[in-house]
Image (cartoon, helix red, strand yellow):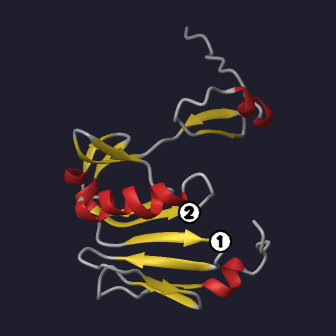
Amino acid sequence: MGMPVHTRMFTADELADFPDDGNRYEVIDGELLVAPTTVRSSPVTEVQPDLLVFSGAMDDVENSRQVRMSSLWLAVEILSPSTLRLDRVRKRKAYLEGGVREYWIVDGKARAVEVWSPGQTEARVERGELAWQPRAEHPALTIDLVVLFRDLRRDG
């Protein structure tokens, strides 16, 4: 006869005590989730986008937590004061040279999204409506940026 397995329940308050080790820790209904998804383009470049979209083909998945950068249809980074230079310079270069089809930098302070594609020397800056259509046979995803940014404080 099997014995029931008891797992420890975690609380959201306990997350503050977890180490700053590069992992993203989350708790859902008491279950601890360690959730980094990494994207690798070479043995010396691996990043964790804030949001990513890839084809989902098994050939694009290196292992359960890593996908090939060249398989990304979209990588999104959300700026913060501590990541501003990294996201705009080093990560942009890594993503675009690594084969990402489109890279967005979300700037809440400016209430804008910088849209980058391989080969561009300047971003297309969107402030009203942002449309993304990775495949012509599917309808575009359209985001109303005015509504998205409406409740953000101007100074934060």
Disc 1 target residue: 108
| Amino acid marked by disc 2 | Ile
Observer-nearest residue: 27 or 50? 50
Q: Earlier in the sequence, mark 1 or mark 2?
A: 2
Q: Quadrant of residue 122?
A: bottom left
Q: Residue at x 30, y 49 (%)?
A: 67
Q: Nearer the viewer, residue 59 or 108?
A: 108
Q: Position of residue 46 (x, y in %)?
A: 33, 44
Residue 110 versus residue 95 in the image, above or below: below
Q: Position of residue 55 (x, y in %)?
A: 29, 64
Alpha-carbon span between mark 1 and mark 2? 8 Å
Please indicate, yes or no, whether residue 51 appears anywhere in the rendered image.
no
Amino acid type at image mark 1:
Gly
Instruction: Tally the marks.
Output: 2
The local crowd at label 2, few if under 14, some if 14 to 19, many if 20 or more residues have their Cα within 10 Å, is some
Secondary structure at numbered mark 1 = loop
Pointers 1 and 2 in contact (C-beta within 8 Å): yes
Please state the horizontal and vertical placement of residue 114, each as a whole percent of the image: 48, 77
Q: Position of residue 35 (x, y in %)?
A: 52, 41
Residue at 62 percent of width and 58 percent of height: 80
List the residue tagged with mark 2. Answer: 78
Taking the image as shown, residue 15 lies to the left or right of residue 34, namely right
Q: Is residue 16 left or right of residue 47?
A: right
The disc at residue 97 is none
Picture residue at 40% right of the left edge, 80% below the top: 123
Image quadrant holding the C terminus, namely bottom right
10 Å crowding of disc 1: few (<14), some (14-19), many (20+): many
| Camera-nearest residue between 13 and 20 | 20
Q: Residue at x 52, y 86 (%)?
A: 126
Q: Secondary structure at mark 2?
A: strand
